[in-house]
Amino acid sequence: MNRRLTTALLAATALAASIGLASAQTTLRIGLAEDPDVLDPSLARTYVGRIVFASLCDKLFDIDEKLNAVPQLALSHETADDGKIVTITLRPNVKFHDGEAMDAEAVKFSLERHMTMQGSFRRPELASVDKVEVVDPLTVRLHLKTPFSPLISQLTDRAGMMVSPKAAKEAGERFGQKPVCAGPYKFVERVPQDRIVVEKFGDYWDKGKVHIHRIVYQPIVDSTVRLANLKSGQLDLIERMLATDIKEVRGNPRLKLATVTEIGYQSITINVGKGEPAKGPLGSDPRVRKALELSIDRDALNQVVYNGEYVVGNQWVSPEHPYYQQKFPTPKRDVAKAKELIKQAGAPTPIAVDYMVPQNPETRQAAEVIQAMAAEAGFDMKIRVVEFATSLKEAEDGRYQAYMLNWSGRPDPDGNLYVFHRSKAPQNYGGYSNPEVDAWLDEARTKSGQAERKAIYEKVAEKLLNEGSLIYLFHRRWLIAHTAKLEGLKMLPDGLVRVVGLQLK
Amino acid sequence: MLTLIGRRLVQLIPTLFFVSVIIFSLQQLLPGDPALVMAGEEKDPEVIEQIRRQYRLDQPVPIQYLYWIKGVFTGDLGESMRLKAPVLQLILQKLPVTLQLATMAMAIALLIGVTAGVVSAVKRDTWIDYAVNVISLWGISTPNFWLGIMMIFLFAVTLGWLPASGYVSPWQDWRQSLATTIMPAFVLGNAIAGVIMRHTRSAMLQALQSDYVRTARAKGLQERTVVMKHAMRNALTPVITLGALEFGTLLSGAVLTEQIFTIPGFGKLIVDAVFNRDYAVVQGVVLVTATTYIILNLLADVGYILVNPRLRG
């Protein structure tokens, strides 16, 4: 009987093989690490969703390698001297996927939709905008409540994505099931957890640079399986590959690796002001926090867990970033000094710390390495692995002492700072509060010159790096592996797959 | 017979009510706040408040339950917070996928399990019996995710015969559909085959020692006829029940297998929903699978009575 079974199985597999699984050369198949949420620029909230939006919805501005805002649907922007009026000039002859004109009226509609729609996540991003005025068909003017320098940078992300007013009015809250934007590809179909299919948009404003006919996005959660699909040719590109798989990809002549340092960071958040757990030596004494930082060898951590592929750092932006404060370099490991600081603080060792770590194999491994290093200086880091959604709630309620958390980052440094350190800000999980720092953070938002802002942030850095609630560890690299046949992939610090200019040879 | 079915159907109502209450209240025990998860990275307090109001998370749990159950009676299972799509639509999208996978897995399990069980009972205490036993033990004890990944590496990466993952509907392209589902169906079927084999073997051993088989042999019937016609038919009744139960389990979603092969069925739907605290989806899927399970159970009982006249009382 076993022979019969084997024969049947072989027949089935041979049949499958003979069908020929190759697909048309102009289809690009991209493996995503998760299933995106709703594809509505106002309601979307996940990173993975932004990868799909990169083909569907163009933004007013895009970013370049140096994180400057560069023209996309808009050609230029100008801020009035008082910082309260921003005039945006639009690109002429741009159409939405449904043929409607992408003009000043459409921009006003889209921005107001972001600002007023129920459940819109863009509302806080555009909170500084008071009203949107149409000057002429190709000019809009944004009137601000107060000067807000990160505004243009907000318009390089979902807040800058324009939707067809006609389609949005018709679909209402269901717009995300069939988004109509002005990107290089238009929406074809979506089967949740299975695939999202988009097709080249014939009237795209930059259509000469769009070479691939169709793109299929497939969420494949397991990273081993994602890589297996790439190797077998089922996929052409995979995002967020594991650092431990780099060697394998580099050794495969049919594959290529594209990397770029992220704009976000990985850090340990320390509870300094939320309830009882904050009252331990770690939360109450900055010297003990410094000691914990000094006990960690960031380079070793990077080597052991991430094959040395990530970029170590000690600030909210990476050392390559224009806003990195050179005056405060990454400290080297110094166990003797760490012990000395603990002694000065008068804390009895070992210092027990409730160390909350979200469930993820890599993060967990990093936490274990930190645990071992910190132990040498006198810390007893008690790792508590918690599923991610639960960990957020625990952090919100202050039921932790140290929390391993990463931030995907924003192009403007304000987005990596303000909500984490301003008193009572939504992501200030550590409960840090300092009126001086609050005032500086507010002030930096009103200045537009880089030098001027950087000078304010220097004061912020001096405070936060010595007494703040975050220990910054390193910056990951976005790792994208793709078939060697794919050409024209340009990596920018947000790690998104920009599809214009891509070619499959 | 009809009264029996009628009685069982009436019993279904309190069972389902109980199930719905359990689903709803257990879910509330999950740590984590759905509005906080939904709020994404920004976590603006105003947005969080709005989400709470919109999905009635600010109301007491019994009120939330009443709103939900009212919707269920009118065919509205609510809306997915994450995808902004009706739950019913999501379920209808996934149901055919899960049904196809479960049916294929069950077919493979029965084919292997019953054949192996019968062979090992007939060839009792020979090397064939031992070999089949070892193989079935391997089937039961091999973790699905391991077997799945190994098969992907062999058939997709090394040999390149089958796609590593993904799913194609049979209405779209039946051959591709077969190619994408054969590996996950085998992984699922393999685990169940072992269980079925053990049950078939013991039932067959019992049947082969019974009086009517001795009589059949005494009549001079061929061994093949004795085994296939007399012993196997009787031995199969418990296997049918077992099969129905296993089929029900398959329908509730094969989480790990679906995850590895990226099959967009119930398993993946429910896992994503749980991690995102998308309550309406979890409730909808569990309610549908619980109902299906209960109905399958009922069908198994009815089938049992149909093939075994002694039970018709």
Image (cartoon, coloured by chain):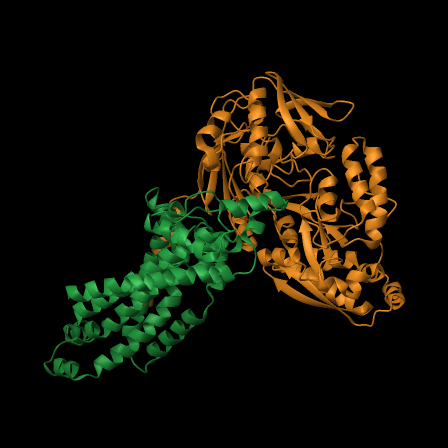
The chain assigned the colour orange in the figure is A
Res. A339 image quadrant: bottom right
Question: Residue placed at 68% from the left, 37% from the top?
Answer: A492
User: Is residue A343 at least partly visible in the picture?
Assistant: yes
Quarter of the figure with the N terminus of chain A: bottom left
The chain assigned the colour green in the figure is B
With respect to residue A24, does B138 lie above or below? Answer: below
User: Is residue A35 at least partly visible in the picture?
Assistant: no
Residue B119 relative to residue A464: left or right: left
User: Where residue B303 sits: x, y (%)?
Assistant: 21, 66
User: Where residue A330 sits: x, y (%)?
Assistant: 83, 51
User: Where residue A64 sits: x, y (%)?
Assistant: 70, 32
User: Where residue A63 sits: x, y (%)?
Assistant: 68, 33
Quarter of the figure with the C terminus of chain A: top right
- Comparing A501 with B72, the one in front is B72
As drawn, the residue found furthest toward the top would be A136
How many numbered marks, from 0 up? 0
Question: Residue placed at 79% from the left, 44% from the top?
Answer: A438
